[in-house]
Amino acid sequence: MKDVSAKWTRADSGQHYVQGRFSSARARGRDPRLVARLLREHGVRPARGGLLDMPCGTGRLGPVLAATGEPVTSVDVALPMLAALTAPPALVGEPRRVLASAERLPFADCSFDVVVCCRLLHHLHAPDDLRAIIRELVRVSSRLVIASFWDAGSLPAWRTRAGLKPSEGHLGRRARPRAEIARLFREAGAPPAGFAHSFRFLSQQAFVAARREDATR
């Protein structure tokens, strides 16, 4: 995980994400639209701990999460990301900011109604790291985890395996089969309740909504 975290802890990483990483409105809006869709489908329980945004980055999901009307806790391993985080217009006051790693979140079990994890899992290479992070996300949620991953069944992932698209190397992002993601969430006690894609098979980015088996409505 140290090699992964180093990608975002550079002093200029926050400004890079704000100014260049998602430069077009289409790119900036894709993940928030999918998260908003899953929140509508699965709901948010008022006064049940609010939402956790981990990793929050520079706050791209902030407006969507704040629109639920519930408190949002923004967590990231990189101080430059948290420094660049701004409160969305829909949020009253600043979001709660916490510097922490997804490997060991500083929260009690079942602290949040919904845990959102966007653009982290595809950076994990070791199966044990992936399993541990998923278990930690489920641990701090009392009901629902929404997490993105790269779908190995997509056309871009197939092109990479076929050698038609350059690999990102040993530290690059990695696609995973939906069946593997589903199995790891089931093992953590939160079977998938649904998946969401921008363009199924054409886009690598996908989201899973996993509901804890012991959750009460």
Image (cartoon, rainbow, N blue to C red):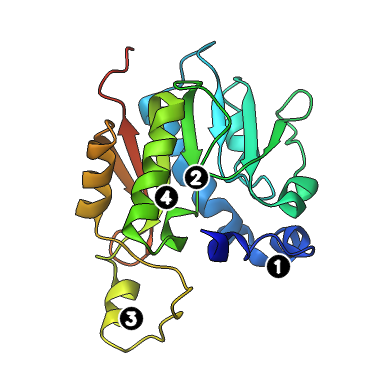
Q: Amino acid at mark 2?
A: Glu
Quarter of the image for residue 76 reads top right
**Which of the two residues, 212 or 131, is positioned nearer the viewer here?**
131
Indicate which disc, 4 or 2, sits on the residue closer to the N terminus. Answer: 2
Q: Amino acid at mark 3?
A: Thr
Dot 4 or dot 3, earlier in sequence: 4
Q: Dot 4, how many residues are within 10 Å of its Cα: few (below 14), some (14-19), or many (20+)?
A: many
Q: Residue 132 sits in which quadrant?
A: top left
- Residue type at mark 4 is Ser
Sequence-first disc among 1 and 4:
1
Gap in angstroms between the C-alphas marked 3 and 2: 29 Å
Query: In this rendering, which labeled residue sits more in front, label 1 or label 3?
Result: 3
Residue to which mark 3 is pinned:
160
Residue occupying the point 40% across, 54% down: 129
Q: Nearer the viewer, residue 191 or 195?
A: 191
Q: CA distance from mark 1 to mark 2?
A: 28 Å
Kindly check if marks 1 and 3 are in contact, taking CB atoms under 8 A apart as contact: no
**53 or 126: which is nearer to us?**
126
Q: SS for tag 1?
A: helix
Q: Secondary structure at mark 2?
A: loop
Residue 55 position in % (x across, y down): 57, 46
Q: Residue at x 33, y 48 (%)?
A: 131
Mark linked to residue 148: 4
The location of residue 62, given as percent across then percent down, is 64, 38
Residue 182 picture location, percent across and down: 24, 45
Residue 20: mark in rendering: 1
Label 2 belongs to which residue? 103
| CB-based contact (under 8 Å), mark 1 and mark 2 | no
Residue 198 appears anywhere in the view: no
Q: Are marks 1 and 4 in contact (CB under 8 Å)?
A: no
